[in-house]
Structures are given as C-alpha cells and as structure tokens.
Amino acid sequence: MKNFSNVNEVLDFAIDSEQQAADFYDSLAKEASTKEMQKTFDRFAKEEKGHKARLLKIKNEGVFETKKEDVLDLKMTDYLVAGPASGNMSYQDALILAMKREKAAFKLYIKLSEIVSSDDLKNIFRKLANDEAKHKLSFELEYDTIIYREN
C-alpha cells in the first residue's frame, strides 16, 4: 500500500478509488447486454459516486456521521473466478468481477482504517468498508438468485 504523509493524501486516495469504481460500473452498464444488467450496474455506479461525494465532503468540511452495522458475507468470491471486464462479458462474469472488486474495496478501507491515527477517520473508513461489504452482498444475492437458481 502507498505511504501517506497526511490525512488529505489518504482521503484523495480513497476519493480516486471511488471514482475508479464508479467508472468501472458505468462502463459495465454501457456494455450491458440486458436492461436488468444495465440497471444493476447504474445503481452501483451511483452508489460509488455517493461515496466519493461523502469523502469530498469529509475532506472539505471534516464532518461525518457513522453507525455500526454488521453485514453478512456469503463468501462467494472465495470460490468464483472471472476474467477482465469486456464488452461481451456474460452477466455471470460481470457479477463475479463486481463481487471481487467490492471485496478489494472492502479490504482497502479496512487497511486505511488501520493506518490512520484519527478516530474519526478510522470510523469513516470502517463505514465505507461496511458499505462495500453491502455492495458485495447485493451482488452475491443477485448471483444466487439469477445464476445459481437458473442452473
């Protein structure tokens, strides 16, 4: 992980990560082969943009509220494999890739929560990790509903 010299660098890194996630979901939505896929990925792009806006607000105002929530992990990504994103990606592969990206984002925010000294920032990054865990769970449930039950 990159070494950060101040809080603003940590926040800038997280803001950039959220923009990359939003861009990823926007590109999947544009390449989606069905309306259902497009709606799913548009929704997640919007949520990642919301995370970015939240981080920008924290950076600019230094204000953030958190509450503790536990999120179920079905651990599907431990057993699934998908290739890189492409225009002819199946919905199954897109869901797997999305789950893996959300898992990576979760791990990033947990790691960031461990390296910052501010309790407020620790709470912010734990909340964002929790949000990413929720996203992963949504994709896992979608995968369970659409892919497992169809096979």
Image: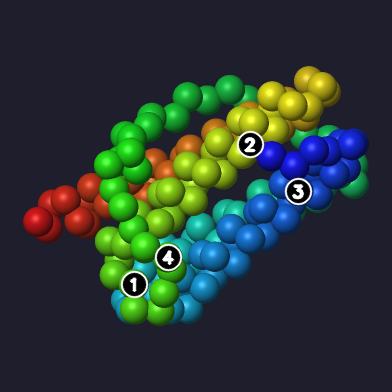
- The kind of residue tagged 4 is Pro
Nearer the observer: mark 4 or 2; the answer is: 4
Q: Find the distance from the CA under tag 1 to the CA under tag 3.
A: 29 Å
Q: Position of residue 66 (x, y in %)?
A: 68, 28
- The kind of residue tagged 1 is Met
User: N-terminal of the two: label 2 or label 3?
Assistant: 3
Which of the 4 image quadrants contains residue 59?
Answer: top right
Residue sitting nearer the eye, 89 or 66: 89
- Which residue is at a point 81% across and 49% down the rendered structure image? 12
Let me know if residue 55 appears in the view.
no
Q: Find the distance from the CA under tag 4 to the CA under tag 3.
A: 23 Å
Instruction: Quickly name the residue at label 2.
Output: 109
- Which residue is at a point 22% across and 57% down the rendered structure image? 146
User: N-terminal of the two: label 4 or label 2?
Assistant: 4
- 75 w.r.t. 18: above or below: above
Q: Find the distance from the CA under tag 4 to the CA under tag 1.
A: 9 Å
Q: Find the distance from the CA under tag 4 to the CA under tag 2.
A: 23 Å
Instruction: Quickly name the residue at label 1.
Output: 89
18 sits left or right of 11 in the view: left
Instruction: Quickly name the residue at label 3.
Output: 13
Q: Residues within 10 Å of mark 1 (few under 14, many from 20)?
A: some
- The kind of residue tagged 3 is Phe
